[in-house]
Image (cartoon, rainbow, N blue to C red):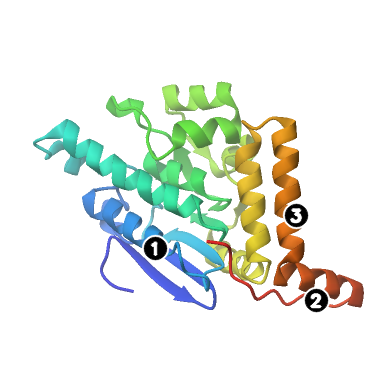
Amino acid sequence: MGTDAIELGIDDGVATLTLSRPDAGNAINRQFVSALRAHAEGLTDRADVRVVIIRSTGRNFCVGGDLAYFAGITRIEPEMLELATDFHAGIHALRALDAPLVAGIQGAAAGGGVAIACACDIVLAARSARFTLAYTAAGLSVDGGASWFLPRLVGWRRATELILSNRVLTAAEAAEAGLITDVVADDALSVELQAMAARLAAGPARAFGSVKRLLQASSTASLLEQLDAEAREIAANAASADGREGVSAFLARRAPEFRSGGRR
């Protein structure tokens, strides 16, 4: 761990990305997106990383773009394009990992903070957490993949309303809408996040990656294309060390010991 805007720690198969600008609400600026991209791309070939946690320090998860930083930019359009490009490269690199992405949300998640949460596979939120898109309130359009993830999570109609209205959702409302996975007590968030990561880290990393790829492709693939993809993935997983171990453990009525890293 260091003094980066996003700090990375790796322990026992779990990589933890900690948003570390608490005094600024972990707002997104140049340092933030550079760190996100560097850390995410650095995880690409780490076979020892089986789960990635995204968490934050301070009262808020991420309040979105650092508007004070934006206001100080002189070459607005090209510099904002560069910032968004790095932000998106980091999001894409994280999504390409076989390792499940697990986020823990406290306080406010707004704008790009919501986009980061949307990119994760499992999102746990403290009961007092709040969610809002916030972009159009500042005259901006969405980024971070929000226009891609959000309709898939909550539906096109609700996604449009949330982006245009900037309505604030409680954690319970976010869970009901499908934006997050579950709501936990405020003082239990850290414990629940670590417990979830530990359970996933003990699972079959390559099979998890297969599931992620199949689900992502399912909204645009034809049934035949999806069936073909499922056939290829299950065959490859059956032949893998984890697949053989899983079948053997099931037949022997014992807990499996999955050891292989993901494909990426």
Residue under the image location 17 percent in, 35 percent down:
78
Can you identify the residue that label 1 sits on?
18
Element marked by disc 1: strand
Instruction: Confirm whether residue 107 shows in the render.
Output: no
Q: Residue 216: give x, y in percent of width and height.
A: 60, 41
10 shown above or below 102:
below
For numbered disc 2, what is the local secondary structure? loop
Return the residue at label 2: 255
Residue 56: numbered disc: none
Q: Position of residue 96 (x, y in %)?
A: 50, 52
Name the N-terminal-most of marks 2 and 3: 3
Residue in the image at 43% along x and 22% along y: 164
SS under mark 3: helix
Mark 2 is surrounded, within 10 Å at the Cα level, by few (under 14), some (14 to 19) or many (20 or more) other residues, namely: few
- The one nearer the camera, 44 or 233, is 233
Label 1 sits on what residue type? Thr
Amino acid type of disc 2? Ala
The Cα atoms of the two marked residues, 1 and 3, are separated by 34 Å
Looking at the image, which residue is at 75% across and 67% down?
243
Where residue 81 sits, quadrant-wise, is top left
Tell me the mark number nearer the camera, choosing from 2 and 3: 3
x%, y% of residue 73? Answer: 12, 39
The residue at which mark 3 appears reads as: 234
Along the horizontal axis of the image, is 135 left or right of 151? left
